[in-house]
Each structure stands twice: as C-alpha cells, then as structure tokens.
Amino acid sequence: MPGAFEQWPADVTFGVLGDLIGYAIRRAQIAIYKDFDASIADLTPPMFAALVLIEANPGINQSRLGQIMGVNRATTMALIDRLVDLDLLTRVASVTDKRANALKLTALGQRRRLRAIDEVKSHDARVARRLTKAELATLRHLLGKF
Amino acid sequence: MPGAFEQWPADVTFGVLGDLIGYAIRRAQIAIYKDFDASIADLTPPMFAALVLIEANPGINQSRLGQIMGVNRATTMALIDRLVDLDLLTRVASVTDKRANALKLTALGQRRRLRAIDEVKSHDARVARRLTKAELATLRHLLGKF
DNA sequence: TATTGTTATACTCTATAACTATA
DNA sequence: TATAGTTATAGAGTATAACAATA
C-alpha cells in the first residue's frame, strides 16, 4: 500500500478542521470505509445497507427506504436498479398501493446478504477492536445525538 | 422539506446495521453533511477541506494533499481542477521538485476561505450544540482512535 | 526504480426537474 | 393535491491504468 490513511498525521497542520466535530467524524469514517472496501467484494456500503434494511422491513417500498437511508427517490431508484441488475433484488407489485413496489430479496440476494453480514461483522469487529466495550457504548450513545 | 433525515426512526428495524459502529458513524455523518450542504453554498466538504489544508500547509503538493485527505492522485487532480476552474487556487511550479506543483490560494480563494470558515464554524456549532462540552471532548477522543 | 502530475476512462453516489399512474 | 415510481440529465467523488518528466 502506497501510504495507508493516517488518521491525524503529526506533521500536518489542520487549521480550523481540527476544531470541527463534523471533520473528526468524517476522518473516522474515511478510515472505516477504507477497511470496509478492502473487506467486502462487490458490495458498496449503501448496497449492503439496502439489502439489510429491505430484509428487516418486509414489504418496504423505494420511497420509504430512501427516507431511511437519507437519499431521495431518484437516488434510491439508481441503487435499486443496480441491485436488480445483479439479481439480488426484485420489485414486486404492492397489494396495498398500486403506485408502489414492495422490495424483495431474490434467493441469490438472500445468500449474498448472509455472506455479506459475516464479512461486515468481521470488518466492524476489526475496527471496533481499537476501543473498549465501554468506549464503544459511549461512542454509540454520543453519535446517536446528531 | 419532505421529511428531514431522522437519525434512528423508531418504526424501522435496522437488523445488523444497529450493531455496527461503522454504521452509527455513517448515520451521524449523513445528518451532519445535510446541515453542511444547507449551510455552505458553492463549496463541498472536500473543497473546503482542501482550501484550509493548503493554506495551513504552505507549499504542499497534490500528492501529499491527497494522502492527507485519504484519496489518490487522480481524485486529487479532479478536486484541484475544480478549485482552479473557480479561480480559488493556482498551481505554482515547485522550486525544490520540478515534478511537483506547490498549491496556492488566489486572492479570491483567500476571501472565499475566510468566509467559508465563518459559515462552517456556525454550522459545526449548530450540530455540536446537541452535546455538552464534556461529551464533545469525549467524542473527539474516541473518534481519534480509528 | 520510484514519484509527481497528468489524461483517459468508468462507476457510484447524489441531486433536480419533469412525467405517469395512483391515492 | 399529494405521493410512488420513473426517466433524463448533470455534477461530484472515487478509482485503475497508463504515460512523460523528474528524482
């Protein structure tokens, strides 16, 4: 690796960035996402999140999924299209609302989801190892306030 | 706003995502970035970070900037191109290394940087207001461990 | 040989605007 | 009127692979 990501290199002056809680969160996220990308093949973080959320919330439609993930309908459309193209997901006509699609994992999507969960858990455990259990609980609690 | 982002909507099941520290960081970041985007016109977070880092580290070149920001040379190139096109930045021939460019803010870039710092400080203070000073210090400390 | 900048190329993420069908 | 899905379009962020100039 030509220089792995250094969280806060000592020889760099960060200026006002060093005072911003938003930037501290961003840098932590960069470090974690790099580990995610190196650990999970073929799935991006939004694709993984979508697979988990759809399975955990049966019958959910695209708009609601987008709201949960914090993106709009067009963005959700593109994400779902990619998962459908990979044969991980299907759009099923909703029985309660003729405008809507109930999202459903295919058999392949189910298998990929289960495997991805193992991969992601392993990845998350690796990065979480830098903190104690108590620190992790504190961190989760504080992050939930935003 | 057609449904602002809800950090952890109570009616949603998050499955394994609820156990992942990486996902907790991601959700906090989504909330904070949405406030950033609504607060700072014409500058994205990476553009702002670049302006601050270049000014804080005189003579820095593209490759080193990219290392600090966690992106590769081609990505850094595209980012610098955008800032140059906006007349916020110039590439100056390095005196110590004929391969390299010393990055330098233009007069316009300096003015935009100063104004952006005010805007971003205001934004960051708004999101940080959800935590006490002690909580913020703890959060920053824990985030630094990744 | 290694690094810096650069270009070509491609994919993902994201949004706005407008349209159709349905609620 | 409002919402779900859709399409067209565009820009930002990101990467890989290659090349020339320089170290």
Image (cartoon, coloured by chain):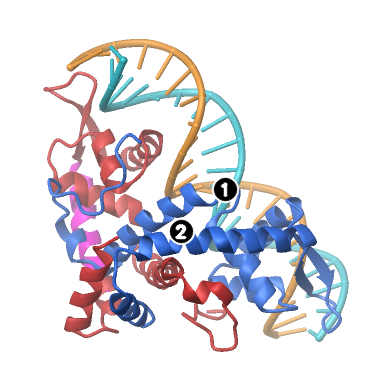
Chain colours: A red, B blue, C orange, D cyan
Q: Which mark is residue B41?
A: 1
Magenta extent: A106-122
What's the amino acid at mark 1?
A: Ala
B20 or B47: nearer the eye? B47
> Which residue is painted at 40% across and 72% down in the image?
A28
Mark 1 Cα shell of 10 Å, populated few (<14), some (14-19), many (≥20): few
Res B93 seen here: yes
What's the amino acid at mark 2?
A: His
Circle 1 sits in a helix, a strand or a loop, which is it?
A: loop
Q: Residue furthest bottom?
A: A10
Sequence-first tag of 1 and 2: 1
Q: Position of residue B146 (x, y in %)?
A: 37, 79
In magenta segment, residue A115 = yes
Numbered-mark total:
2
Q: Position of residue B31 (x, y in %)?
A: 35, 54
Q: CA distance from mark 1 to mark 2?
A: 12 Å
Q: Is residue A103 positioned above or below B61 on the image?
A: above
Q: Main secondary structure of the magenta part?
A: helix
Q: Which residue is mark 2?
A: B123
Q: Are marks 1 and 2 on the same chain?
A: yes
Left or right position of B143 against D21: left
A130 or B90: nearer the eye? B90
- Label 1 marks a residue whose chain is B
In which quadrant of the rendered image does the C terminus of chain A lie? bottom left
In magenta segment, residue B85 = no
Q: Which mark is residue B112?
A: none
